[in-house]
Amino acid sequence: YFPEFRTKMALPRKPGRLAPEVNRILYVRNLPFKITSDEMYDIFGKHGSIRQIRLGHAPDTRGTAYVVYDDVFDAKNAVEHLSGFNVAGRYLIV
């Protein structure tokens, strides 16, 4: 046991772990107001298994949605591929 050695050593990260800010819940903005849940599943489902999609319908939440993936790696993949993706002339903000 060498306490001085232990304090200088960085704790190893578990392989395959993502940064804490990576989440499996995505907040999507700038959606077309008339987009349907089926269209959302078509667009976002290409990047992994989706648990839930919640579209905003109130006047102040129109054009937004929450997309919940089953896996955090699928969510990360969707962010990388769909940020700036053009849907009906609008560029998604994920």
Image (cartoon, grey):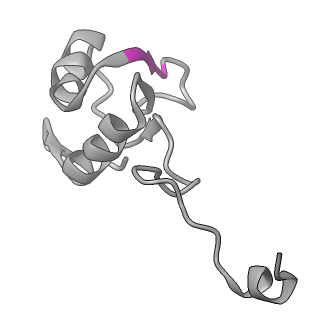
Above or below, 63 relative to 30: above
Q: Residue at x 19, y 49 (%)?
A: 81
The span picked out in magenta is: 51-56
Q: Is residue 92 visible?
A: no
Q: Residue at x 17, y 47 (%)?
A: 85
Q: Is residue 52 magenta?
A: yes
Q: Is residue 75 visible?
A: yes
Q: Nearer the viewer, residue 69 or 16?
A: 16
Q: Position of residue 53 (x, y in %)?
A: 41, 18
> Is residue 59 left or right of 80 when viewed as pictured?
right
Q: Position of residue 31 (x, y in %)?
A: 31, 35
Q: Nearer the viewer, residue 15 or 65?
A: 15
Main SS category, magenta section: strand
Image-quadrant location for residue 10 = bottom right
Above or below, 37 relative to 28: above
Q: Position of residue 93 (x, y in %)?
A: 35, 50
Q: Residue at x 46, y 35 (%)?
A: 24
> Is residue 20 left or right of 8 when viewed as pictured?
left
Above or below, 18 relative to 57: below
Image-quadrant location for residue 65 = top left
Q: Is residue 29 magenta?
A: no
> Is residue 34 left or right of 68 when viewed as pictured?
left
- Residue farthest to the front, as pictured: 1
Quadrant location of the N terminus in the rendered image: bottom right
Q: Nearer the viewer, residue 2 or 29?
A: 2
